[in-house]
Amino acid sequence: MTWILVLIIIFAYLFFILFLGSWAGRGRERSIVEYIAASRSLGFVIMYFLMGGAIFSAFAYLGGPGWAYSKGGAAFYILGYCALGLVPWWLWGPRALRAGKRFQYVTQAQLFSDRFQSKALSVIIAVVSVLAFIQYITLQMKGCAYVFEVASEGRIPFWAGALIAYLVVLIYVFYAGLRGVAWTNVFQGAFMVVTAWVLGLYLTYHLYGGPSEMFRQIAQANPTHLLVGPGTKMSFAAFASALLVSVLGFSMWPHLFMKAYTAKSERVLKQTIVLYPTFAIFLIPVLFIGFAGIMQVKPDELGAPDRILPWMFSHMQFHPIAVGLVLAAALAAAMSTQDTITHAAGSIFAQDFVEVLKKEKHSDREATLWVRISVVCFGAVSYMVAIFGGQTLVALLLGAYGSIVQLLPLAAATFFWPRATKAGAICGILAGVLYNYAILFKIIPKFWDIHAGIQGLVLNFIVLIVVSLLTRPMDRVHVRKFVTL
Amino acid sequence: MSSEHEKDGYGITLFRPGTPHNAKIRGIVFFIIFCIITVVQSCYWLFANTVRPFVLGMPFGMFFIVLFITVEFAVLVILYFLESENMEEKGDV
């Protein structure tokens, strides 16, 4: 009967989040700036958790320990990129914030397409972002479904588990917009961090008497597991380029980039960046959980490495309340990413795709309605992909996922290089994205062990510069607006 | 870019017009520091691809990465306080 108690705790948690999210949006006006950017009014604490909730995803909570368990030293890359990921935002963030206030942007593509005077660019960015988001959401849904499966000892099937968590998210995103997302992330973020530390330290001390002893035993059993390079799970070039591409690409993710429009001031934005490396420190015990599993269970017995966290505590004879809380935390990790992405995907599809292709501009009320419709449709599509997704479809989405870093040259050109032209921007991003797909579908071989994103990025920059210099410069007054922000 | 471009306003513009000289130097210095930190993090295996000694319970490689996260954090705090004086509270609309 313990599973009933576990499920009660999880459902109580879901109701609480639903209540909190919906409560946050009460009595607010229905403008598009409120729905997408919370009227550009968010303070430091909320910004911090809003950005943190995005990285504390199912990947960090389930995939992180999975990496530590199966790939060992390669998992250190997660810490490195998580800490550095937001630093490039010091360059883009404040500039995007001022641009948003001055020219009334709420999405990333609005900024780039205005700078390059191109609707095509807006559509390209919208399509790539939405495809990448579907991949991202699918991972979170699978995480949620897995949590329910473990909690109910197999009584709640995959499709139902994914659906329950997603409906909760959908309701408060639909109803309360970004404010709902922000408030739930504050609670879910704090909850996850506490649970991760308690669980990570408890497991290492309980099973091994401390981390040193744990790592000593791992090194004794498998001397190369805690290293990278030849003979391990990740080569030097793969480690270095994966970390680099993640750092460069992280702040280019549209759902993070567009949060620059939600901050109250430049000060709030920079405070968020300064304190962001703390999230990397919070991830350390999460990796400990994965390392702790190495001496406990054989990979064949476990099945997929991502199962290590649920496996660990379901074999520890914890009290059902503790199991419920840990599972709720894993759910929190997945949901706090789902809500941000769902909200961003709806906003981007409505604003950068529908709005751009329509001849007449929508009124504020209609535009908000369109975002809400897109939120629901996006949810439905990603749910279908999570349940029925085939091989080709998954490859298509993975390609988009890897293409996000290709937005970097656009940001650099917008803020620093007035000579960049519309043709250069479009050719650059197309070259980068297509190159990435070509490697993914094995049309061209992978060069060395360097991450495809870095190779595409180099090509992207070269094409952007060459084509821009070959085409006529754009209107000087217009382009200067963006470098003097 | 060529000086010809700078004259007609199309050259690479790293700073907003009117940025004081020392703020420009500071920007460049910190940019270089962060580039170095990023390179050290991504090539940590050049310096610390070993398990022993254990520091704070972590294998040396992991400790090295955590150490540089701390360094990075300290550098960010310093940069924040140096820039703190002329940060806009509300943005200049």
Image: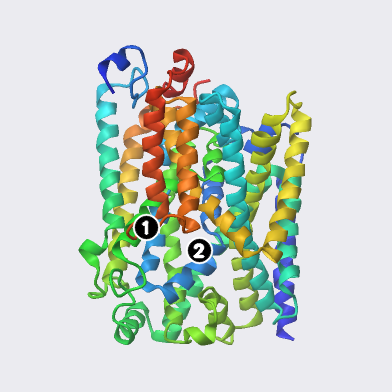
Please tell me which residue is depicted at 37% across the width and 24% down the height of the picture: A469
Q: What residue type is labelled 2?
A: Ala
- Quadrant location of the N terminus of chain A in the rendered image: bottom right
If you read the primary sequence from the N terminus, does the residue marked by circle 1 or circle 2 appear first? 2
Name the residue: 42% across, 22% down. Answer: A471
Residue count near mark 2 (Cα–Cα under 10 Å), binned few <14, some 14–19, many ≥20: many
Question: In the visual, does B43 lie left or right of A189?
Answer: left
Pick the residue in front: A417 or B75: A417
Image quarter (top left, top right, bottom left or bottom right) of the C terminus of chain A? top left
Residue A60: numbered disc: 2
Q: Can residue A179 be seen in this view?
A: no
Q: In this view, does A298 lie to the left or right of A387?
A: left
Kindly indicate the quadrant of the structure image that contains residue A316: bottom right
Kindly identify which chain the residue marked by label 2 belongs to: A
Residue that numbered label 1 is attached to: A80
Q: Percent from the top left, x then y, of residue A406? A: 46, 43
Which residue lies at the image location 65% right of the left edge and 48% below the top edge?
A: A181
At which x and y percent is residue A109? 57, 34
Please give left or right for residue A317 compared with residue A292 in the image: right
Element type at marker 2? helix
Q: Mark 1 lies on which chain?
A: A
How many numbered badges does the structure rendering display? 2
